Image (cartoon, rainbow, N blue to C red):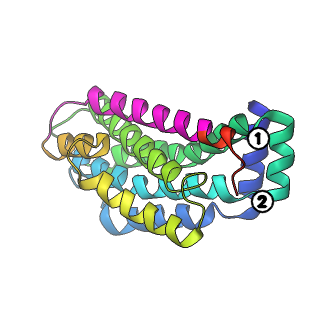
Amino acid sequence: MTALIGYHAGLLLRSQRWLPPVLLHAAFLAVGVRPGEPVLGALGFAAAGLLPVAAWSVRICLTQEPPAARDVVAAAAGRARAHLAALLTGTALPGLLGTAAVLGVTALGDRRTVGAPTALATGFLVTAACVLTGAAVGALASRPFVNAPGWSVLALVLGSLLALVTTGSPAKHALTAVVTGAPPSWTAAVGAVLLAAATAAVSCRATGSRLSA
């Protein structure tokens, strides 16, 4: 699995397709986060921006291989394992962005009402909830479920929006807790882990059971 992840990461870095989602999140932070503002609200805003970035990143990794190369890798390592490696690679990029954002926002934000350890814990939990929920959206909006590029992008945009506003979404639950100043929510993070794991399992099973375009 390590070799497969390295392969997908290499493809991502060489193609420079990672640049648009990274720039999107950077612009999101530049517009919405200011030094000295309440740290919990800033952390929630930064995490919310990661959800569509994670969905986009996962879709990029699932679709970046030429069909011939995908078939060769699938024949060597198994279609389901190759698909899982792409999912993990796509999730790692927003995870790294989120970690950097949590550290930066916590350092620059106003922590007069909350200590640094609590701010960091809250930031990492809400970031995990948003990144993993976004990864699930990206998996469902890509092959093998949606192969047509236009419909895939539409599903990604609508899925990201619904994940941010729909009651029951782990991301929505985590962001609501941050906005209201509630303690760090392990429930939302655990729910996001379960959602992402279930989505990955279904996606890999569907990929392994038939030839995906």
Magenta stretch, main secondary structure, is helix
Position of 197 relative to 111 (above/below): above
State the extent of the magenta-drawn residues as a range.
181-205
Q: Is residue 211 left or right of residue 197?
A: right
Pick whichever of labels 1 and 2 is earlier in the sequence: 1
Residue 135 is a magenta residue: no
* Mark 1–mark 2 CB contact (< 8 Å): no
Residue 190 is a magenta residue: yes
**Label 2's element?**
helix
- Judged from this view, the residue extending furthest toward the front is 210
Q: Position of residue 25 (x, y in %)?
A: 46, 61
Q: Pick whichever, 64 or 185, lies toward us.
A: 64
Q: Position of residue 151 (x, y in %)?
A: 50, 68
Q: Residue at x 44, y 63 (%)?
A: 155
Q: Amino acid at mark 1?
A: Gly
- Does residue 111 appear anywhere in the picture? no
Q: Pick whichever, 60 or 114, lies toward us.
A: 60
Q: What residue is shown with label 2?
A: 14
Cα distance, mark 1 to mark 2?
A: 12 Å
Q: Position of residue 54 (x, y in %)?
A: 49, 52
Picture quadrant of residue 45: bottom left
Quadrant position of the N terminus in the picture: top right
Position of 134 relative to 115 (above/below): below
Quadrant position of the C terminus in the picture: bottom right
Q: Residue at x 37, y 63 (%)?
A: 158
Q: What residue is shown with label 1?
A: 6
- Judged from this view, the residue extending furthest toward the left is 180
**Label 1's element?**
helix
Position of 126 relative to 64 (above/below): above
- Judged from this view, the residue extending furthest toward the bottom is 150
